[in-house]
Amino acid sequence: MFYVSEPELPMPESSSQSSYGGWRDIQGHITTGLAVFAVILAGAPYVLPQVQAWQTQQGLLERPAMLQAASEKLQAQADAAVATKTREALKARAESLKTTLYGSKMDPILGNPAAPIKIVEFLDYNCTYCRSGAPLVKAFLEANPDVAIIIKEYPVISKNSRPLAAYALAAAEAGKYEAVHYAFMSGGVDSEAEAHAVLAKAGLNPQTIQARMSSEDIQNYITETLVLGDDLAITGTPTFIIDGEPYNGTNIPAMTAAVEKLRKKS
C-alpha cells in the first residue's frame, strides 16, 4: 500500500465510512430487532438477558431466511433515511450547489461535456461497488450521448483512496482523465509504482503528475469535496445525483428512468 506526502487538511468525521449502507446507523436497529426476535422465539414475556441472547442466536441460526429478511428490511430503512437527508440537503442548498456541485472547473467529466443532461457521481477508487459498476456506467454513457457524468472524487474508504483521487484529478487537467479513471477502477493499484505505470500507459509523465497531485489546490479541492459530501449526507459510494434525487449504487434502470423523465421536461 502507498501513502504520499500531502498537506495536513481537515477531514469531516463521516468521511471515514468505508462502504455504502450506513452500517453505524443501522446497528441500533439490528440490536432492537434481535431483542424482538428473542421474545418471540422464547415464547415468554421475560427471560434472563443471558438466556435471551442465547435463544436469539440459536433461533436466528435455525432461521437464516428470517435473519436475511430482517437485515434487508433494516438496510432498506437505513438507505431510505439517508436518501431523505440527502434529498432535503440538496433542496435546501439548491442555489449554492449550482457552483459547488455542478459548476466546479476542477470536476472531471465522463461523456460529452456539452451534453444537456448532467449527472453527479461521488466515487472512491477503493470502492468495490464503484469498480463493479464502472463498466455499467461506461455502457450507460455510450447508450446516452446526451448525458454526462460530473465526477466528485470522494476518497472515504482508506488512506490510499486520497492519493488515487489526486492522481486522477491531475490526469484530468492533462486531458487524460478517462483512461486513468477506468484503469484505477479496474483495481490492483496498490503502490506508487503501479499508479505511475497507469499514468505512463495513458501517455502522461508520472513525475509531472506526481508533483501536480500534491499541489495545494488539488488537495484543497479534495477536502472541499469531502466537506460537500458530508453536508449532503453522502454516506457511501457510489452515490449518483440526478435532478436533485440521490441514487445509491449503480442502479442503471433507475438512472435510465430518471434521465428519460428529464428529457420529457426539456
Image (cartoon, rainbow, N blue to C red):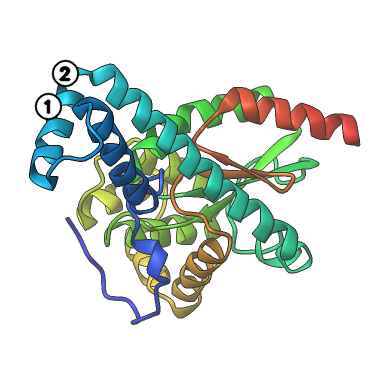
Q: Give residue 30's quadrant in the image.
A: top left
Q: Is residue 35 above or below residue 59?
A: below
The residue at the point 37 percent across, 45 percent down is 29
Q: How many numbered markers are drawn?
A: 2
| Label 2 crowd bin: few (<14), some (14–19), many (20+), radius 10 Å | few
The disc labelled 1 sits on which kind of residue?
Answer: Gln
Q: Residue 45: image x %, image y %?
A: 25, 36
Residue at image mark 2: 62
Q: Give residue 209's quadrant in the image.
A: bottom left
The residue at the point 55 percent across, 42 percent down is 80
Viewer can see residue 148 = yes
Viewer can see residue 145 = no
Q: Is residue 96 left or right of residue 18?
A: right
The residue at the point 17 percent across, 24 percent down is 59
| Label 1 crowd bin: few (<14), some (14–19), many (20+), radius 10 Å | few
Q: Residue 241: image x %, image y %?
A: 64, 46
Residue at image mark 1: 58
Q: Secondary structure at mark 1?
A: helix
The disc labelled 2 sits on which kind of residue?
Answer: Glu
Contact between marks 1 and 2 (CB within 8 A): the answer is yes
Q: Is residue 167 above or below residue 220?
A: above
Q: Residue 43: image x %, image y %?
A: 23, 26
Q: Residue 44: image x %, image y %?
A: 22, 31
